[in-house]
């Protein structure tokens, strides 16, 4: 009976191992660092990527069990970006070394580290290709159609470097953010909508996002509110404007916004004044081109500080900025 019991136990172990292998291969899970205590998991816990069946079969049962719950996600992408941003060098080998050191500190198993580094290597190559795509686009006028074309090109580019499963795991949040951003741009550029309708639709759009994305977009939404209040408050006294700002953002914030508006208006007056003087100089046919340039430079240096000159040049090149103040 004891022998029969041992034989049955062995058969059960073999069947359990075969079922485990089958489930793991179908799920595509690769990376795991799970423990019985969730609070003691390393930062990268619950990240995964794919591995081919040959690699899985070559691993021991104990290694497979240790890797079950480790899944890649948007957090993996955040780790990659942090390594890139914090590294003084952008050489791939040095970036991979930096990632390796980070994962070692987290007590991640070496075979898992190797898989993450392989994914990171492809991500570095993808980033380089993505930079070229963005460089080709930067001269085009920015419209919702252009943005849609760019997002499509980025999706196609990802397929060159990652499996569809990896794209879903790594870029799901980014794709949601991009799609919602495209929808917001279409709203902003819809000439048939009033400003009030645009504001409401933008708020509805942002309300559908996860909380951390909402927080990132709130400042831009507040800016639109400020611009709308400014436009509706034209011709009102400072006290009335303050009341409008305070009703929306609170008394203290309202005072800061009104002070900022005062500074913007003063800047606009200064730019408009020097722009008029520059035009007068340029229309003076008695001056040579060199003399005109000399007078204009002296004029700028007289009325604007070194810190203000760069901003002044931007406004002189883009006079429409004055109307958006």
Image (spheres, helix red, strand yellow):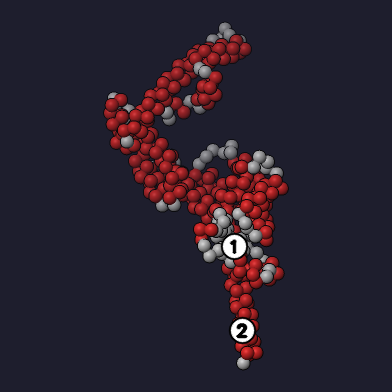
- Which of these two is toward me, 125 or 79? 79
Q: Secondary structure at mark 1?
A: loop
What crowding class fits label 2: few (fewer than 14 Cα within 10 Å), some (14-19), or many (20 or more)?
few
Question: From what the image shows, is residue 279 above or below residue 99?
Answer: above
Question: From what the image shows, is residue 221 above or below residue 257?
Answer: below
Q: Quadrant of residue 170?
A: bottom right
Mark 2 or mark 1, whichever is nearer to me: 2
Mark on residue 300?
none
- Which of these two is toward me, 311 or 288? 311
Quarter that holds the N terminus: bottom right
Q: Quadrant of residue 306?
A: top right
- Which of these two is toward me, 212 or 301? 212
> Residue 21, position in %: x, y?
62, 73
Question: From what the image shows, is residue 262 above or below residue 39?
Answer: above
**Residue position marked by numbered label 2 in the rendering:** 9
**Residue position marked by numbered label 1 in the rendering:** 32
> Residue 313, position in %: x, y?
54, 23
């Amino acid at each position: 009976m004891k022998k029969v019991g041992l034989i049955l136990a062995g058969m059960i172990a073999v069947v359990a191992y075969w079922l485990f292998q089958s489930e793991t291969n179908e799920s595509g899970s690769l990376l795991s660092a799970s423990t019985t205590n969730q609070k003691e998991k390393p930062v990268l816990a619950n990240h995964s990527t794919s591995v081919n069946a040959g690699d899985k079969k070559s691993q021991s049962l104990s290694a497979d069990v240790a890797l079950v719950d480790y899944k890649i996600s948007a957090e993996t992408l955040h780790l990659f970006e942090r390594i890139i941003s914090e590294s003084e060098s952008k050489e791939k080998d040095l970036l991979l070394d930096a990632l390796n050191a980070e994962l070692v500190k987290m007590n991640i198993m070496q075979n898992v580290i190797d898989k993450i580094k392989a994914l990171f290597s492809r991500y570095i190559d993808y980033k380089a290709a993505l930079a070229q795509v963005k460089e080709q686009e930067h001269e085009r006028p920015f419209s919702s159609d252009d943005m849609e074309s760019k997002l499509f090109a980025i999706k196609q580019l990802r397929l060159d470097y990652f499996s569809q499963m990896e794209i879903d795991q790594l870029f799901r949040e980014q794709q949601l953010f991009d799609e919602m951003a495209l929808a917001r741009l279409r709203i902003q550029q819809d000439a048939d909508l009033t400003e009030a309708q645009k504001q409401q639709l933008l708020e509805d759009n942002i309300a559908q996002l996860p909380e951390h994305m909402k927080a990132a977009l709130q400042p831009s939404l507040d800016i639109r509110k400020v611009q709308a209040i400014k436009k509706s408050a034209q011709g009102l006294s400072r006290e009335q404007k303050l009341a409008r700002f305070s009703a929306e953002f609170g008394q203290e914030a309202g005072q800061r916004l009104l002070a900022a508006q005062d500074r913007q208006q003063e800047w606009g007056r200064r730019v408009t004044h020097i722009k008029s003087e520059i035009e007068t100089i340029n229309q003076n046919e008695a001056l040579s081109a060199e003399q005109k340039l000399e007078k204009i430079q002296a004029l700028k240096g007289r009325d604007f500080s070194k810190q203000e000159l760069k901003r002044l040049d931007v406004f002189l090149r883009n006079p429409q900025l004055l109307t958006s103040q």
